[in-house]
Image (tube, rainbow, N blue to C red):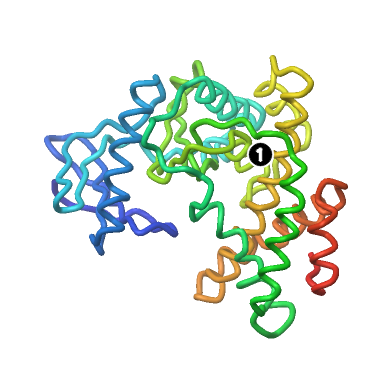
Amino acid sequence: MSDLRPLAPDVSPRRYYRGERAGRSYILMTYPDFDETARANLQSFLKVRGWLYDNEVRVPEIIEARESEGLVLLEDLGSTSLRAAMESGVEVREAYLGAGEVLRHLKSCAPPVDLPAYKGSRIDLKHADVLRFYAPSLRGCESESALFEDYAQAWAEIEHGLPTCPQGFIHGDYHLENIMWLGHGPALERLALIDFQEALQGPLPYDLVNLLEDARADVPEDVQTGVKEMYCAGMDMDERAAFDAWYRVLGTQFHCRVIGLFIKLEQDGRAQYGVHIPRLKAYIARALREPLLAPLKRFFDDAGITF
């Protein structure tokens, strides 16, 4: 490849470059610090990409992979994420319905048997970042260990009373920047997935609430409702009740994790993440009005943590 041009970095350990080879544009994915963690991340990327491809989900073609060096040459899917497509005129409902249809397809696919479990994963445990980074920004001091214990107890009380959550493949970072727009047509043809290397086997509502309660954009209420109804079509009353309860729990945990992450990134000099904090606060404040989350509301009230 020649004339490599760096693409905008995200919060991941990977770096991406666009270049040309034999007159065709490609993406080079690299790991600047190719340690054991990065090696496992790359192996997961390759494994999950293969599984998605086998299940008829559009993903980048692998042109060449040098696993020992942490280098992968990928098909260039272009620069039009689903968010960019909406900014260029693609109708909001069409965009979100398409993304929801991909998730509806994925929930019918048996996940890889060796996919890591959501329970105990970084995504699962990091929602306590609301105490690590957000709470100190309000209280002016670090959160003491007892506060973390009370927070965990509040969530344990909530989850103890819930029905079993439906399980399956979850992307883990399912938002508009990780869904590429390839043109019009059926959802599985016009949309492609990227950044799926942290996929897990876990609670199905997670990806849907990640999509619809977007940390970076406001999604119209009617669009949220329409996509959720499409996704849940065919569920019986008990299945729907379980899905809705876990949707709220997982959504609130997601926002608690991301508000902590964005506060930390802002403190580290990445001011662009700070503009999303009011939206995340609003998501959490609205969720805390639901009776299901009463133990969490009591915890935040007692701790003097407001949203």
| Spot occupied by residue 200 in the image (x, y as percentages of width and height) | 46, 40
The answer to which quarter of the image holds residue 147 is bottom right
**Which of the pair 281/39 is nearer the observer?**
39
- Decide if residue 67 is on the left or right side of residue 220: left
| Spot occupied by residue 34 in the image (x, y as percentages of width and height) | 23, 60
Mark 1, residue position: 212
- 119 versus 54 height, above or below: below
- Decide if residue 144 is on the left or right side of residue 10: right
| Spot occupied by residue 14 in the image (x, y as percentages of width and height) | 32, 55
At x 53% / y 41%, what residue is drawn?
174
Q: Split into 4 quadrants, where in the image is the C terminus?
A: bottom right
At x 21% / y 44%, what residue is drawn?
72
- 124 versus 74 height, above or below: below
**Which of the pair 277/51 is nearer the observer?**
51
At x 78% / y 37%, what residue is drawn?
221
Disc 1 marks a residue whose amino acid type is Leu
At x 61% / y 72%, what residue is drawn?
132
